[in-house]
Image (cartoon, grey):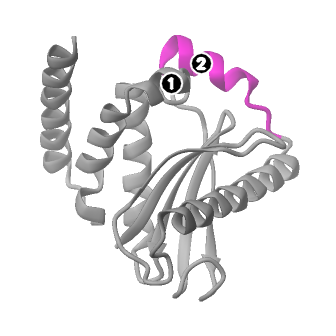
Amino acid sequence: MVFAFVITTLQPGFVKLLYSTTFDRDDSLTDRQDRKEVLQRVCQKVASEYDAMKRYTNRNDAGDFERLRSDNVLPEFSRGIVRLEPEEFFADGKMILWFAAIDTGFALILENSENVHVATLNLKLLIQNLQQYTQVMTEPVVALARVERIVMVVERSIPNGVLPLHTSALLKERLKETDKSFSRLIKEKG
């Protein structure tokens, strides 16, 4: 089960939670402000991991942005898993699966029992669809102004916080449904 999904900036010295949604309740986080603070701390954790990985690998994102913008080729993401001890952020232990590139981070906060391989595949597809339909990595301000598109992609990718298994036929069908939904949304919003 997915507890939450977040999108964050990962610029050095400036980590900002851009978007978040929670699917499951944590009894220790009854207040909306508490939940927001915990998710911001998760973003800080992802930023720290991303920064360490960039320094270790000497990675530079300069060419990735241009390729994404001109050829719509997703960058090679830095990624990782962070296991959280009970009471570290949440009442019970969770794990964070994160992908990051071009100073943008995407993270799923998962139950420890979740299949990491399935979660990784779903997060890759979610990022691909977010970029295709919202341009979240190349035009984050525009994407956030149309948050209903982000919500639609997330709801279709992780319905009710459940990570779907994908077969080729099922995946093609889901992508067709998403395309149709976006066509309708764009016609409605003009």
Q: Above or below — where is 178 with respect to 162?
A: above
Residue 163 appears in view: no
Q: Secondary structure at mark 2?
A: helix
Q: Which disc, if any, is residue 67?
A: 2
Tell me the tag on residue 63.
none
Closer to us: 28 or 12: 28
- Measured along the vertical axis of the image, is residue 108 above or below residue 12? below
The percent coordinates of residue 35 (x first, y second) are 52, 66
**Tag 1, which secondary structure?**
loop
Is 70 in the magenta? yes
Q: Which residue is at a point 14% across and 33% down the rendered structure image?
A: 176
Q: Is residue 141 left or right of residue 145?
A: right
Residue 54 spot, x, y in % from top left = 80, 46
Counting every numbered tag in the picture gives 2
Query: Mark 2 touching mark 1, by CB under 8 A?
Result: yes
Residue pictured at 18% horizontal, 24% vertical? 185
Q: Amino acid at mark 2?
A: Arg
Residue 21 place in picture, x, y as percent = 41, 55
Image position of 142 with respect to 152: above or below? above
Q: Amino acid at mark 1?
A: Val
Residue 190 sits in quarter: top left
**Residue named by callout 1:** 73
The magenta span reads 59-72
